[in-house]
Image (cartoon, rainbow, N blue to C red):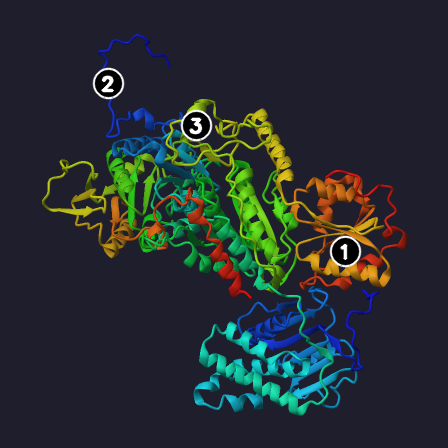
Amino acid sequence: MSSVLTETSSRAGASSEVVANDFSLQVATANGSGSQTANSVLMRSIFRMGVPVSGKNLFPSNIQGLPTWFTIRANRDGYIARKRDLDVLVCMNPETANDDVRDVRAGAYVVYEKKLGLENPGKKRDDVTYYAVPFSELVVKITSAPEHAKLRKLIVNMIYVGVLADLMGIEPAEIEKAVAKQLKGKPKAVDLNVSAVKVGLEYAAKSFPVKIPFRVERMNATEGKVIVEGNTASALGCVFGGATVCAWYPITPSSSLCEAFIDFCDHLRVDPATKKKNVAVIQAEDEIASIGMVLGAGWAGARSFTSTSGPGISLMSEYIGLGYYAEIPAVIFDIQRTGPSTGLPTRTMQGDLLLCYFSSHGDSKHPLLFPASPEECFTMAQQAFDLAEQLQTPVFVMSDLDLGMNNWMADPFPYPTEPLHRGKVLDAASIEKVKDTWGRYKDVDGDGIPYRTLPGTPNAYAAYLTRGSGHDENAQYSEKPQDYVNNVNRLVRKFETARTMVPKPEIQERPGARAGLLAYGTSHYGTTEARDKLATTFGVTLDYCRLRSLPLAAEAVNWMRLHERIYVVEQNRDGQLVTILRDELPELATRFVSIRQYNGLPLDATTVVDGVLNDAPASRAGRSDAQKGGLDA
Amino acid sequence: MSATPNAPAASPAPKTNRLGLPKADYEGAKSTLCLGCGHDVITKQIINAFYAMGVEPHKVAKFSGIGCSSKTPAYFLNRAWGFNGVHGRMPSAATGALVANPTLHGIGVSGDGDTASIGIGQFVHLVRRNLPLVYIIEDNGVYGLTKGQFSATADLGAKQKGGAINDFIPIDCCSLAIELGGTFVARSFSGDMKQLQTILEAAIAHRGTSVIDVISPCVTFNDHEGSTKSYKYSKEHETPVHEIGFVPFFEETLAEIPAGDTKDVSFPDGSQLRFRGVGRDYDPTDRERALKAIHESHARQEILTGILYVDPSKKDLSALLGTTGEPLTNLPLDALRPSRQALDEIMESLR
């Protein structure tokens, strides 16, 4: 597909006009070479200079030796989506260097290991600017001590940090601070790394009189913010949300969520007097066991969760259905990766919507939450536990690899002020009042949500047998057609109640807009950037709705009714959200235009701009008779 | 049921256990299994064992998977809690529940298909984790609920009702459990009610996973000539390795088996097991010899029964996880949610 849009945000071309705080920089290394530390230092230094920044790690499903790319986007206007075209490239990996250079846009700047000979005849591109640096020679200077020799592979990365600092104007003082933070103040390691940065700085200062015109200049747009991975934020949400049982099975890209939870709990969930833990974390034998443990714990009354990715959800499906039908709270984090099958296990996707929404055989449906930022990972983790217990059902938090494993700028997380909402649980005294008139699956309140009791409740009327087989409202085994129908129809009423409780969409409107963009999760970033670009560059004014949950909240449905043309942006091949929208809102089916990216890379704005511009101009004007703002949510 | 409204005061008070509860409080719904099913005998012994041990019914959590065996938790301890999970995956549900609330007494009822075929993975890891759970395998060598297919415990050469012969090596859940570090491994026979009740009582006292493989003939699909799990075959081949006496912590003396030429094993709560050999030298605390004896019994076509291996000294799962041992289900908010200062410090570390 040809791009309708030529990249307009890169304000420097082959000319050396200086562009401040607007570039995309990629570092190509081999994985296992320790470049992660250098890349994090680079990103944090720019962040600490007050410039909005994002860092995305593109890594292989491998431990050592395969190509890895780290992309940093700095943008003074706060756009932090992945950018399709690169402005600056650092080539450290001989395996990929030729391809890497081939793929950068005309006018880009390439810093490379001199040995790679990228400017040799036949290789050199005329439309890029090269900076050859003898990294492998420079590193020997600072690692001449025998005990340092084996560190060369790691330390060499810090030299390119120094080179870029000089070429792009990153403040050395911030780099030093970032090194100290990254290496947690270990003095010897800090000294060695800082000296590597200096070697790079000095080499570039003396060798390259003409600098890269993409510059980092101090500004004030990151004050108070933090840098954090989504999985860390979710783990923290579980801690503050009162989770006490975690069962998990390692799978990329979800493992770091449970590992972060373990780390936090090691100091936040230890009884000061006894030194015993008030949390249980079990690494299960597989995902089937993980969800079984989570449901067992949820049935017993604990706030329990698991974290997994698509293959894990596939395995869990049978037990998820039991959770739905037997009505047991559970929180499942799906850190989505590229499927189907093993797919691209280290690449991102929003490909599990249909899998999770309808997970398990028979008629089943589950609430899904869509965090789009670390802050939302933190708050939605807590909401998920409330919803799971209030609705007595499995609730999914739909993150993805991009959000979960990459570093994001975020506002500090708000301290939760609400109590834990634990739902309709009857204790011994309450049961004593109702005695045998209590029925585990009776809809007393008309909201489809029954009252439950917890194992161990000391009352002779409190116990019941939970089962995934047919049951009546007293939890007795039943194969009677009417009992079955009554029960599953009540579950539909419960899902309608869920609709009123799930997080509401975030809506942004612009005067005159009659068509809109609709996105969820990490598609937010490319979509909102595209929305601005469409307005400023192409005169296409669009409203925006960021869906934060399923089932659809009334506010989301109303917004859709008010827009004659709705561009639904998502990161999967089949337009999974569009499928759900067309099914649930058949009268609006023709309004939806699906814009999709599914190459395993985070969504870029160009894909969205192209998608909208490829639609007929009359359609994208959104000729609607509906009056915006007139309808009550 | 009709009671006599004006019964004379002279009618004897019902017999009760140490909690003052009658046995009726340990009973369940009427069984829907086939008449004569071995599983119903096991159900009866479960009722007897919990009654005799004086466990509060509301502190019991019953677990099962799918199959005839897994229906039985409905037939005992009506006042206890039940979780009927998915096929072969009951151990994980039990693990979650009992870790969340370790003050519950867990009992799981599974079958040979539910454990040795579809559930072998969860069985293996249950044993490794030493979750405090009485885990009963109602073992009849066939899938009853789907009408008589062989299971993975069917013996080599066993004949199916329709005449097919099993050509596959059986899985012995007891030797497997011992190999995996099981801390309480027993085999019994539903036709040996006394031994079974004693084993169950000891299993209830044990803090760890108690694997009890009970040969429990399927009267409908596997009780014919040529079956190695029929009543007749099992009676003829059952070989108890010892007599077992068990004294729970709340009782004083072991009257049944006098000391002398016996082996005693004590539980941390003070309960005691006493073993007396019957015609052979068998030490249920010697892992290697227990495995050897089981292996040899296969060649001799003996069904060894008794507590084949026991070690009450090992840590259970809560101890291994370092948890408090108290329920994690109703902790106060201040124990669950760290302070505002703790969150501030974490945020500062991310700047």
Judge by depth and name the residue closer to the eye, A556 or B264. A556
- The residue indicated by pointer 3 is A431
Q: Residues within 10 Å of mark 3 (few under 14, many from 20)?
A: many
Residue reaching furthest left?
Answer: B260
Label 3, label 2: how far apart the Cα atoms are: 28 Å
Q: State whether discs 3 and 2 lie on one chain.
A: no
- The residue indicated by pointer 2 is B13
Label 2, label 1: how far apart the Cα atoms are: 77 Å
Which quadrant of the rendered structure holds the N terminus of chain A? Answer: bottom right
Label 1, label 3: how far apart the Cα atoms are: 53 Å
Label 2 is placed on what type of residue? Ala
Which of the numbered marks, if any, corresponds to residue B71?
A: none
Judge by depth and name the residue closer to the eye, A353 or A363. A353
Q: Residue at x 55, y 70 (%)?
A: A62
Q: Residue at x 66, y 69 (%)?
A: A51
Q: Disc 2 on helix, strand or loop?
A: loop
Please indicate whether residue A627 sits to the left or right of residue B41 in the image: right
Residue reaching furthest right?
Answer: A618
Q: Is residue A102 above or below residue B7?
A: below
Q: State whether discs 1 and 3 lie on one chain.
A: yes
Please indicate whether residue B44 sits to the left or right of residue A34 in the image: left
- The residue indicated by pointer 1 is A595
Q: Disc 1 on helix, strand or loop?
A: strand
Location of residue A116 by image quarter? bottom right
- Where does residue A207 sit, x and y in percent of width and height? 67, 91
Q: Disc 3 on helix, strand or loop?
A: helix
Location of residue A78 by image quarter? bottom right
Q: How many marks?
A: 3
Chain at numbered mark 1: A
Label 3 is placed on what type of residue? Ile
Q: Earlier in the sequence, mark 1 or mark 3?
A: 3
- Where does residue A564 sit, x and y in percent of width and height? 83, 46
